[in-house]
């Protein structure tokens, strides 16, 4: 759970490389498989079989409810592939069926396709014009979603819990409506689980947290899956996979033996950690709610599992630097939301330490 800087100062890390170092730093099981695999085989390309990719694909489809998996190297690359699946699906029906619906305040990555569906002007403005045919609706605006849909819609993309946007969940009703409209208009429902997935929200993916779970057609994942090594991917149902024939999509580095083996080890450890993650996540939110009672500028504590946001009435940026000085790492998104994405090995004792530091930081405001 700890990082050390060049002077040897120790930091409790509650951001984990923006949700990436899922088992913390130097986890003995991860270090061991990396060392072992480094001495055997690092890369084969997708022209040749290796023993870990198929096993990992099977694991992922089992835990997600999808049928197929494609591996790439980052979140943005996963988003790009998702958009190609939606476009490919639409194109098979009509050349006019190319529109994609996304949400305001969303974040899907910094490549051109991903930026085109990212609903925040500050990321887009310097690079416009972006992809045509993208409509944005407000999160949980059911009437807006219905109005944006037409026969031209080939796909809808959203995060189950907006991460960079401030730890804001999509409602159960909105999720179900999106599913219904995708079925009605023969469009692809894409779930961006890059930040709110692979165990972080207290389920494998946030759509599994709904009272009546909904299955998307396509699920993007990245960040925590390979414990700090770059890996992303796309899970899809057969209906969506049918849009992509051999040769239509690919990547050189995706799904290599090192990252796949590490991800398999990660899943083994994750299964052991799940009860602890649920307990400690709840404890963390409760302790933060305790701070909310003491400090009037804390508006809301929200999130799921180990994806936690604290919304303030005031700017949070200086609290982040204050945290660094006091040996606690977290960040601030959207100016006023303190964001915590700790490693899955978080324990109550780490929460106690963090909340003690936060109390001292808050007392200055
Ligand atoms: C929800 C979401 N989608 C996509 C991305 C882009 O991922 P990457 O930075 O690996 O390209 C991020 C990164 O923060 C994200 O949070």
Image (cartoon, rainbow, N blue to C red):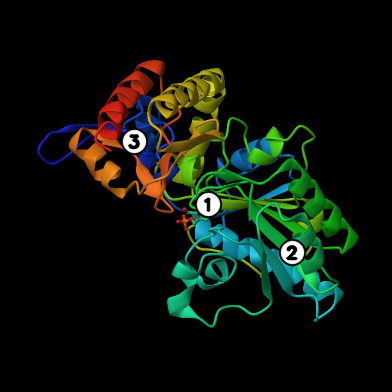
Relative height, residue 37 to residue 354 (above, below): below
How far apart, in angstroms, are the residues tagged by discs 3 and 2?
A: 42 Å
Q: Earlier in the sequence, mark 3 or mark 1?
A: 3
**How many discs appear?**
3
User: Where is residue 307 drawn, in percent x and y?
Assistant: 50, 37
Question: Residue 35 has which mark?
Answer: 3
Q: Earlier in the sequence, mark 2 or mark 1?
A: 2
Viewer-nearest residue: 197 or 125: 125
Determine whether label 3 and label 2 are within 8 Å by CB: no
User: Where is residue 228 drawn, in percent x and y?
Assistant: 39, 43
Which residue is labeled 1 in the image? 232
Viewer-nearest residue: 27 or 357: 357
Image quarter where the C terminus lies is top left
Name the side, left or right, on which 47 lies relative to 353: right
Which residue is labeled 2 in the image? 155
How far apart, in angstroms, are the residues tagged by discs 2 and 1?
A: 20 Å
Q: Nearer the viewer, mark 3 or mark 1?
A: 1
Relative height, residue 304 to residue 99 (above, below): above
């Amino acid at each position: 759970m700890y990082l050390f800087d060049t002077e040897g100062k120790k930091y409790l890390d509650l951001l984990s490389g923006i949700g990436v170092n899922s088992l913390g730093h130097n986890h003995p099981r991860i270090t061991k498989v990396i060392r072992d695999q480094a001495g055997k085989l690092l890369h084969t390309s997708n022209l040749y079989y290796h023993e870990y990719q198929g096993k990992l694909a099977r694991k992922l489809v089992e835990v997600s409810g999808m049928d197929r998996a494609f591996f790439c190297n980052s979140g943005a690359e996963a988003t790009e592939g998702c958009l190609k699946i939606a476009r490919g699906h639409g194109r098979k029906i009509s050349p006019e069926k190319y529109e994609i619906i996304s949400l305001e305040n969303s974040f899907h990555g910094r490549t051109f396709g991903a930026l085109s569906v990212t609903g925040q002007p500050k990321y887009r403005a310097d690079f416009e014009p972006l992809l045509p045919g993208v409509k944005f609706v407000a999160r949980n605006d059911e009437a807006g979603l219905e109005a944006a849909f037409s026969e031209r819609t080939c796909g809808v993309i959203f995060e189950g819990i907006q991460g960079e946007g401030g730890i804001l969940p999509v409602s159960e009703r909105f999720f179900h409506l999106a599913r219904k409209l995708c079925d009605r208009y023969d469009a692809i429902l894409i779930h961006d689980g890059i930040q709110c997935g692979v165990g972080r929200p207290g389920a494998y993916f946030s759509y599994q947290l709904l009272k009546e779970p909904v299955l998307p057609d396509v699920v993007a994942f990245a960040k925590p899956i390979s414990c700090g090594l770059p890996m992303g991917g796309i899970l899809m149902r057969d209906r969506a996979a049918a849009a992509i024939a051999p040769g239509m999509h690919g990547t050189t580095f995706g799904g290599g033996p090192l990252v796949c083996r590490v991800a398999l080890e990660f899943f083994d450890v994750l299964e052991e950690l799940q009860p602890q993650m649920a307990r400690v996540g709840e404890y963390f939110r409760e302790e933060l709610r305790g701070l909310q009672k003491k400090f009037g500028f804390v508006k809301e504590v929200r999130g799921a599992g180990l994806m936690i946001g604290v919304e303030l009435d005031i700017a949070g940026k200086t609290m982040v630097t204050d945290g660094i000085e006091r040996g606690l790492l977290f960040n601030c998104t959207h100016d006023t939301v303190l964001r915590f994405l700790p490693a899955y090995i978080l324990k109550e004792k780490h929460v106690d330490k963090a909340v003690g530091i936060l109390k001292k930081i808050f007392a200055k405001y």
